[in-house]
Amino acid sequence: MKLFEIELWAQRVITRLLSGGLKEDSLVELKAKWPEPRWNARQLGGHANAAKGAAILWIIGFDEQKGLVGALDTEVGDWFNQVRSEFDDGVCPALLGAVAFERNSINLVAMAFSTERAPYVIRNPARGTDKSGPFSLETPWRDASGTRSAGRMELLSLIESTSRASSIEVLAATLFATLVFRNNHTVRASPNTPTEQRAIKWYLEAQLYFTHPSEGTITIPFHKISVTVTETTLGRVLSLDNLKFDVATRYEGNRAIADSSAITVSATQIVLSGSGSVQMIATTLDEIEYGPRLTGNVEFHGEFHVAGIVPPMTFEATMTSEEPPAKDERIGLWRI
């Protein structure tokens, strides 16, 4: 994972948090200050085991109650070596990268870890004290209430998850940005409209292919889906909050036929019993004072949380900027 990808991931999470979205998700841990290595190795091990092979992200300098609080300068390599010494045989989640960045002029640090060598076993952090108890090693596990010891079924699930993993691929996508009036989003504005009166409306159409190789069905609730775009000209991470889905169709004569009978889309969720394509439309409004053409590429990211399954299905794709047709009022156009 590249450093810019780690920073983009962290920025997306912070954008969601500052806008009142969900707090920590299954792959993200927030820390107001640098965690103490000996005791927090257990938390890292539990987080990595529960992620079942997906990368995890720790953000230092963000408090769940206070928001952005900042991270003190710390040598990440020294901290990580102390954490690694708490794992049995030194096998711990690999540090994919650490990046220091700013948000609202406040310094934070994001660290991404690989979890592909699970299960992770830690040494008893209370060893050498009268509180150590009879156990010298533990396989920790993270759940909604905190970190605890993993059970047999959870250890078996680590093996099962590698063979039953479902995935998403972006087959095609088109994104465009249009100037609109802030007080009436349905009316287009122009570059001559005063900047304080206009906003940018973003509109995305995409065809996604879901691969579901295992038996049984999985359910993806709409409220557990996150789609973001990062536009490089503005350097902004935008959450597309108005999402609509439908089963992809093909035409035989004048009759539309569903691309796959293994996918059902209702008003609240997507249900998969096999593989197939889904059409997605997503929009959002960005009240920023900007008028010229947007020409930088766009990073397109999706996170689909499956009910009862960790980790979520995710995708990353780069959308290439294109020049809008002549006399087109759109200020940006991108495709895959």
Image (cartoon, helix red, strand yellow):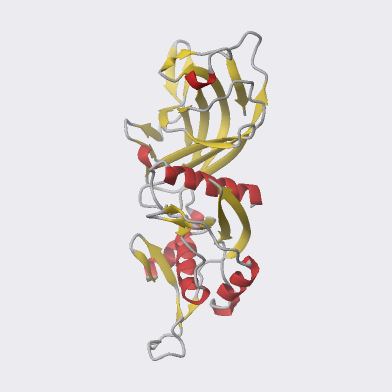
Observer-nearest residue: 57 or 236?
A: 236
Relative side of 1 to 179, left or right: right
Q: Quadrant of residue 220?
A: top left
Q: Quadrant of the C terminus?
A: top right
Q: Residue visible at 57% across and 60% down?
A: 113
Observer-nearest residue: 130 or 252?
A: 130
The location of residue 117, given as percent across then percent down, is 57, 66
Observer-nearest residue: 82 or 165?
A: 82
Q: Residue visible at 60% across and 66% down?
A: 74
The location of residue 134, given as percent across then percent down, is 39, 88
The location of residue 252, given as percent across then percent down, is 48, 15
Q: Residue visible at 41% across and 48% down?
A: 215
Observer-nearest residue: 149 or 329?
A: 329
The location of residue 6, given as percent across then percent down, is 59, 51
Any part of residue 213 in sight: no
Outermost residue, top side: 327
How many marks do you count on the picture?
A: 0
Q: Quadrant of residue 256?
A: top left
Up the image or down, 327 lies above or below 150; here it is above
Any part of residue 230 in sight: yes
Relative side of 236 to 24, left or right: right
Q: Residue visible at 48% across and 43% down?
A: 15
Up the image or down, 140 lies above or below 99; here it is below
Relative side of 302 to 2, left or right: left
